[in-house]
Amino acid sequence: MLEDQRLYEAGLITYMRTDSTNLSAEAVKACRARVEKEYGSLYLPETAPVYASKKGAQEAHEAIRPTDVGVIGTELPDLETDQVRLYDLIWKQFVASQMSPAEYDSTIVTVAAGDYEFRASGRVVRFEGWLRVLPPMAKKDEVVLPKVAVGEELKLLKLDPSQHFTKPPARFSEAGLVKELEKRGIGRPSTYASIISTIQERGYVKLANRRFYAEKLGDLVTSRLVDNFSKLLDYGFTAGMEGELDEIAAAKEEWKTVLNRFYKDFKSTLGAATKSMKGNAPIETEIPCATCGRKMAIRTGRTGVFLGCSGYALPPKERCKGTMNLVAGDEAVGVAPPETDDETEVESNGADAAALQLKKRCPLCGTVMDSYLVDEQRKLHVCQDSPDCAGTLIEQGTFKLKGYDGPVIPCDKCGANMQLRVGRFGKYFACTRYPDCKNTRKLLRNGQAAPPKAPPIPMPELKCSKSDAYFVLRDGALGLFLAAHTFPKSRETKAPQVADLKRHRSELDPKFHFIADAPEKDDAGNPSIVRFSRKTREHFLGSMKGEEWTGWSAFFVDGAWKVKEAPEEEKKPGKAVTKKRKK
């Protein structure tokens, strides 16, 4: 559940899925009284400011504001930190909207130096106004200028040369995309979150460094739709449809007339698209399938570009479901064999022009090709116009992934070497004997390989409460935990007790024996719970009485368990409940 939804359900703010600027007379009166009492009459305008709504705004609800302006965030101790911060932001925005405007003294200084002129501009706040409540974020380009007089002679103390280059428009962030949707009149505040989640879940874009990057599937779907449904994909279509719906709501237009007009045009467009629209056909390569030996084909799906066996389209008895993940070429470094005339792939400095020069050209159409790492010896180059163009190249060489420069990692299960790969959840090490050995290890943020995971231990005596499954002890990124044996059908998890580990001590990995030897109960006789500290990356003990954490904790120090206070971020007062993941 979102933080604003919690505030609304608690009765602290008005309905938040609106872009209306209207305020009730009672709310404005209470706010003005608060401003005059708190900051004085200078900060209160003679008449209450009225703000115009954006074109197409939904005004069925009042603007987002606190239900009681007399309540401030520090007076709400029962809320979580994020909820208090959001409430405080809404409160400040509301109060600032009813205060006097800020006043500035703006100055432009022009300095004559020989045949040149140098100009500097700045401003100084003369009266705070609404800035008293809602200070703006400091801007780097705003400077405070010294007092100078016309005709005054200035001395050059220091010369700092600087050079500026034109930059391309920045990629959309989540906030930037919402702002663009609002600007073009697409969607409503209640649909922005679903739009952003949908384009990610369907594999159209990926979010990296808080910016959206288009995926191959997104480019493909967009080009197909724009080519065949140009009117529907026009930016003004959604805004125009919203206007027609408003006309229907105002009883100025019959809904059947609007639907008939739309469907008549859409039916003919859909019929033409059905006959002419190109599909997403796979492109065969010379790479053999590791399962059946047939040729692998390049496919584009929700998870990205990958290789799938060409035998997948055969009848069920002959069908092969073999697949092979591909890694984006910019994640790979290496040198092509000296006996070839191919361009050498080197680690670039990040410049777009240099990276573009290193890309290969399609032998069929001359278009720039995208590169993907197949394994340590092969890199696959695919025409950017695929699947419309079937141009491919296979480059032989010695390649590796960026991000790890340590020693070769031996597989802890079969002894073979492990290779760095990239998956849906980041970089990881996979055994080179895959699919015979499916062992993997995660690459940590510090650039080191994660320690080998202990094998899971079934505990049939521990039954799940939400299904007929039983728990299995697993070793995860956040330490030991119990998970349903029917995962992913049942996703129930919980923390194990020391008593659970003690019963299965002989099956435990020796590195966890110290936890099985820990005290089973605290000083009051409550069962000890195995927990994990994100800060120290170590296991420690807590205890519960019923559904409440007691505050007792024990840490393994110098070869022995010692009772002491838990770190602040590890304390969990109140009921021990499991948060549901947002779908």
Image (spheres, grey):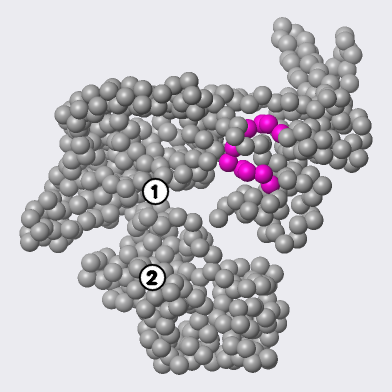
Q: Which residue lies at the image location 83% right of the left edge and 25% below the top edge?
A: 47
Q: Residue furthest top?
A: 115
Mark 2 or 1, closer to the camera:
2
Looking at the image, can residue 117 be seen? yes
Q: Check disc 1 and report the residue beneath it.
A: 201
Which three-letter amino acid code belongs to the residue tagged 1?
A: Glu
Residue 161 counted in the magenta span = no
Q: Are marks 2 and 1 in contact (CB under 8 Å)?
A: no
Viewer-proximal residue among 336 and 88: 88
Q: Quadrant of residue 119?
A: top right
- Secondary structure mostly seen in the magenta stretch: loop
Q: Which residue lies at the image location 77% right of the left edge and 10% below the top edge?
A: 112
Residue 20 counted in the magenta span = yes
- Is residue 127 shown above or below 306? above
Q: Quadrant of the N terminus?
A: bottom right
Viewer-proximal residue among 567 and 120: 567
The percent position of residue 75, horizontal first and vertical second, equals 80, 56
Q: Quadrant of the C terminus?
A: bottom left
Q: Which residues are magenta?
A: 13-23
Total numbered labels placed on residues in the image: 2
On the picture, is 385 further left or further right than 364? right
Looking at the image, can residue 347 be seen? no
Which three-letter amino acid code belongs to the residue tagged 2?
A: Ser
On the picture, is 205 further left or further right than 264? right
Q: Quadrant of residue 366?
A: top left
- Is residue 536 shown above or below 213? below
On the picture, is 428 further left or further right than 181? left
Q: Which residue lies at the image location 73% right of the left edge and 38% below the top edge?
A: 93
Q: Which residue lies at the image location 76% right of the left edge and 52% below the top edge?
A: 73
